[in-house]
Image (spheres, rainbow, N blue to C red):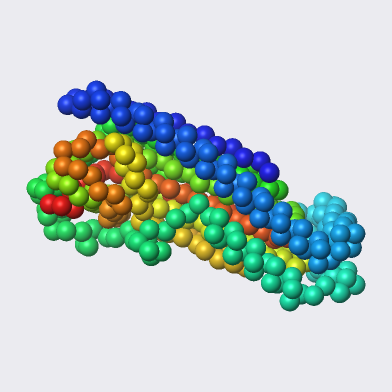
Amino acid sequence: MIIDVDSKHKLVKPDGIAASDYLGALRGMSVLEERVISETRQSAARIEDALSDYQKEVQTLFGEKKYTNYREQIRDRIARYWAAADGLPRDNEGRVQMKANRKQMSSEINQIQKTYGIDEEKLAFLQQSRDQALTKLSPIRDTNGGSPSHLIPTSQIPHDLRAGRTNPWVSITPPYSGSSWQYGWSRRGGMDPRLSGVANATTGEVGSHQRVWDSDASDNSFMHIDYRNRVGVFFQIPVTGLVEAYIELQNIGSYHQVIHDDEFGWSSGTARVGSRITMQVVSPSESSESSAVAFEVRRSGTDFSDWGNGYTLGNSYWAHLFSNQLYTAGQMLYLLVGSYEYLHETVNDVSYNDQVTYRWFIPRIWLRSSGE
């Protein structure tokens, strides 16, 4: 298993913010980053343990020697398929021949499988148990009792905001006070992902690009990526209550693709890929993350594809969020607002080819206390 985790934040002290509140925000960011790094490593280790336990159970079902022989025969047949593919011309005739070779390979692998006499019902039960265990280990948390909110069009926000009336709302625009990016990824098999992200406090741009593929997915591979890019703002809550926010968003990129391709064998695969807009209070006390779903693909299967642009380029959308913690009147809060993209693949003998590119401008953040 390979893990990579990194984070960074910037924070400028605005005029009118007390030094104690500024230092409190810096401490809160440091604590948050340390926790995210620790939780990413712990989550990856638990997933690795769950997959290792599953693999041991499958080996027991086969018999260890029988299982080793089975995998060696399969790997040898696939290696011969790719060796033959290297010699084919890169034209339509070559593609037709490659398709015929793949069909022949699948037929031979099916014959190999029949010689082992595995109880497929027991194997399916083990796969189902594995998937349930991995779902419980997912770091993605749904708010609102498992029914997270979604982005809404401008027509659905309160008339006062559309009219620009600030009372009782506080309107905050770029340049924002701070920025923060955090990513963590772990994999078993496959190759390192290609990642890039932006969290620009000056312009309000947030978002990330993730590109992953594994054309030779082996026994129980996984790739998990979580990437957050956010801007930071100070807000003095006027009366005791939850923080209520309307976050204005202008789309500057919203493409995704999720592709599974069955390779051979008793294959299985699950994908959860998405993007959310989030809000989190960092200081004086940290709240958990509230989120609105921009898009999500959540599918199980060995052969499927899902791709497209989720939003109209340049159009405006809104996220309506609440903190999940009460704050006392007069407290100076530091909040992070921005995007969270995630790409989680767990596959067994299934190739995948995925991409997520979601970017937004945040031209304005409206905040108030729910107690008003």
Residue shown at 21%/62% (left/top)? 155
Which corner quadrant of the image does residue 10 belong to?
Answer: top left
Query: Which residue is farthest top?
Result: 19
Residue 145 visible to an observer of this rendering:
yes
Please determine whether, in this image, residue 44 is positioned above or below residue 262.
Answer: above
- The residue lying at 66 percent from left, 41 percent from top is 2
The residue at the point 18 percent across, 53 percent down is 370
Q: Position of residue 215 (x, y in %)?
A: 71, 53
Q: Quadrant of residue 28?
A: top left
Q: Nearer the viewer, residue 313 or 365?
A: 365
Image position of 338 (left or right of 211): left
Total numbered labels placed on residues in the image: 0
313 relative to 46 in the view: left or right: left
Q: Position of residue 302 (x, y in %)?
A: 66, 66
Q: Residue at x 12, y 52 (%)?
A: 372
Image-based side of 170 in relation to 212, left or right:
left
Of residues 204 and 239, the one nearer the viewer is 239
In the rendered image, the quadrant that contains the N terminus is top right
Residue 14, position as x, y percentages in the image: 23, 26
Q: Is residue 194 visible?
A: no
Q: Position of residue 140 (x, y in %)?
A: 48, 54
Residue sitting nearer the eye, 167 or 85 = 167
